Image (cartoon, coloured by chain):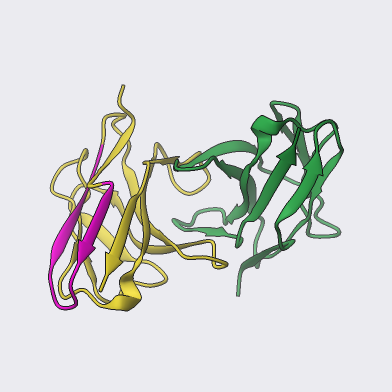
Chain colours: A green, B yellow
Amino acid sequence: GDSVTQMEGPVTLSEEAFLTINCTYTATGYPSLFWYVQYPGEGLQLLLKATKADDKGSNKGFEATYRKETTSFHLEKGSVQVSDSAVYFCALALTGGFKTIFGAGTRLFVKA
Amino acid sequence: NAGVTQTPKFQVLKTGQSMTLQCAQDMNHEYMSWYRQDPGMGLRLIHYSVGAGITDQGEVPNGYNVSRSTTEDFPLRLLSAAPSQTSVYFCASSYGGNQETQYFGPGTRLLVL
């Protein structure tokens, strides 16, 4: 079935370090891919998305590229800040469907 | 715009009690969903609605009921609470289908003793 797998956390980095959070997916069709972020005590909010192969989503210094050949959508940021500490969720949505499938989430801690 | 609102923020129930989690949105979104979030399992879809009067089951619907009498409101009912329903519940809405951005409420933390 359709699924999303993301790297286990927590990930602990120092401020200004480079961030990669891996995400791979299994889907029968051509999904849209999303990264959502959940700050402590809050609901999820969209960070970025990509709707077709080779699209790059970007927002707030974060980027992810839709790689159909490797079924991946890895999240990257060149220089993390303490304020980026949160849980990050990779998700997919199949075209014409009504459901979004979320990964288990990766918790990121950034130390000053 | 308040966005998506949920009440209560926190609730403690005893096994067998019933309750309703409230969800409302003021963005005129047709699509609304309920998820539960459990450690290490991400978000799992409980029920969803594609418009007033139309609901359907998600991945984990057992023990939960929903109805959608208006575009704005999408309450989730627990008929007879069980400890396995201890979780954080999120309501979400979107303008279109699942390809569109979902807007999440702040969540309801439920503890069933």
Residue B13 spot, x, y in % from top left:
19, 66
Q: How many marks?
A: 0
Horizontal side of A36 relative to A57 (left or right) equals left
Residue A75 visible somewhere in the drawing: no
Magenta span contains residue A8: no
Residue A63 visible somewhere in the drawing: yes
Q: Give the residue drawn at x 40%, y 36%.
A: B95
Residue in the foreground of this view, choosing between A107 and A96: A107
Residue in the foreground of this view, choosing between A30 and B89: B89
Measured along the vertical axis of the image, is residue B48 above or below residue A46?
below
List the single residue furthest toward the top.
B1
Horizontal side of B79 relative to B51 (left or right) equals left
Residue B62 spot, x, y in % from top left:
29, 77
Residue in the foreground of this view, choosing between B19 and A70: B19
Residue A81 spot, x, y in % from top left:
74, 30
Q: Give the residue drawn at x 28%, y 46%.
A: B9
List the single residue furthest toward the front.
A112
**Where the N terminus of chain A falls, by quadrant?**
bottom right
Stretch of the chain drawn in magenta: B9-24
Residue in the foreground of this view, choosing between B61 and A20: A20
Q: Quadrant of residue A63?
A: top right
Residue A112 spot, x, y in % from top left:
76, 32
Measured along the vertical axis of the image, is residue B63 above or below residue B106?
below
Q: Quadrant of residue A105?
A: bottom right
Q: Give the residue drawn at x 25%, y 77%.
A: B82
Magenta span contains residue B22: yes
Measured along the vertical axis of the image, is residue A2 above or below residue A14?
below
Measured along the vertical axis of the image, is residue B41 above or below residue B33?
below
Secondary structure, magenta segment, majority class: strand
Q: Give the residue drawn at x 34%, y 68%.
A: B86
